[in-house]
Image: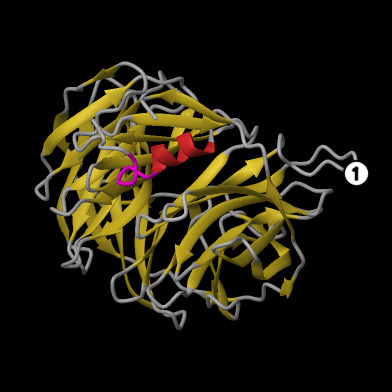
Amino acid sequence: MIRLFICFIVLSSCTKNTGGQKAFHLDNKGISCDADWVNNEQFIICGETSIYANHENGSTQKDAFVLVTNHKTKDVKGFIVGDQLNNFRFENVNAIQNQFLFSGYGFENKNAIVAGFSNNMEMKWAFSSDQLQGFEEPKSAVNKDGNFLIISKKPDTTPYYGVFSLFTKEGKELWTKKLDHIDVMSDIFSANNGDFILNYKEKGAYIDGGTRKKYFISPVLRVSTEGKITYQMKFLIDREKFMDLDFHQVLETKSGDLYFVGSGWTVSNRTDLLIIKTDANIKIKWSSSYKTDHELAIKAAILNEKEELIIAADSYGHSGGMLRAAISPSGDVLWNSFNTSTPYEQIKTINYTKTGYDLIYDKTLSFAAMTTNLEGVSCLGKTSSLTFVRSNAEVILSTHNAEFEETLARWKPCELKVKAVSGLKIIEDCGKF
């Protein structure tokens, strides 16, 4: 069974691929939260599990769960992390320089956790804070030097404060600062120069003094590794056109252009795809919404070798279904492929290979993955092509004045129990292995 699973992952290591269309899931009874790749050799998914959790003491907790593969040695391993008593979850993972960096929560009060592991899942360092808990829809990023930025929250303060902590890959805390008015954290992204880009939906609304029109506020902050906000702007999006919006990811081209991808809930009671493209100074090049006959939100994206934007969207909570599509640098849809799914399957991340795309998603409390060909075609569910109607999203750009505030987090070393899991139950969904 393990060899079958490896053949799914290692497209180039199996016999000649006839389309790259395969899918599997792992019955772990726990949500899949995040995934990452390292040079297409190491592949890792993190989240939680109850079925593989250590219940030797009679408890019923969920443990943090990690699935690691090594493409060269054709090895697949699962690991649980916890204390055999309380619920644990790894919500974000970043892989860098033969190391895995995690953030999540655990212990009795769901304390925020940050930890570094070797690529063999040997714990190198771990810290928890009794002042912090995991942020809703948490994000993290690691820059080119291995500095790891995470977001947490202080439960005893306003829920709209985000607490940002920067650690080195060796586990040294460089700084912790807080930022107010964060309603939804869209993304923390590592820029080409090593800075971090923060994008979020701000609590409240901007009201035009002349027209009294209300706008959603989506700030974009560039933050240095010294903890300084070096540049910031904000997007203003008309509440008479969109009743709500969410960005999920930021991407940067080699030249420094930025993409902000997500979705907007229109006044026509429909969810449309939403993309903003800017230059390096956050000046808008174009902003578009894309109407389809499905309620789709972009959850992940990647740039291919042509620097076309490859988006992965799902209809989580609506009719279900998952979409892959290519967007040209000017915003035109080049191709798209849609497959049916249940309403509660949601995409976590996407990876580009020379033969197609790998997607990690949550299959209703199961780790799941699929591969597609270069046109996004999957063997999973009924596949079709959707009709797109592109419209101007009418985004206004304005200056912003957010400020970091000094704060203490009381990050303290902690012990996490790590145990390898045997007998993983890999379930093949489609494709020849």
Q: Main secondary structure of the magenta part?
A: loop
Along the horizontal axis of the image, is 143 left or right of 289?
Answer: right
Provide the residue designation for mark 1. Answer: 57
Residue at x 43% of width, y 21% of height: 318
Instruction: Name the spot of residue 296 as percent of width and height, x first.
Output: 33, 29
Residue at x 23% of width, y 64% of height: 282
Within 10 Å of disc 1 (Cα), the crowding (few <14, some 14-19, many 20+) is few
Q: Which residues are magenta?
A: 10-14
Q: Nearer the viewer, residue 117 or 137?
A: 117
Indicate yes or no whether the magenta region holds residue 91: no
Q: Secondary structure at mark 1?
A: loop
Q: State the residue lying farthest toward the front.
A: 15
Name above or below for residue 165 compared with residue 260. Answer: below
Name above or below for residue 27 compared with residue 187. Answer: above
Name above or below for residue 403 compared with residue 268. Answer: below
Instruction: Name the spot of residue 65 as percent of width and height, x first.
Output: 64, 47
Instruction: Name the spot of residue 292 as percent of width and height, x first.
Output: 23, 24
Quarter of the picture containing the C terminus is: top left
Q: Amino acid at mark 1?
A: Asn
Let me know if residue 31 appears in the view. yes
Residue at x 20% of width, y 22% of height: 386
Along the horizontal axis of the image, is 387 left or right of 209?
Answer: left
Let me know if residue 213 appears in the view. no
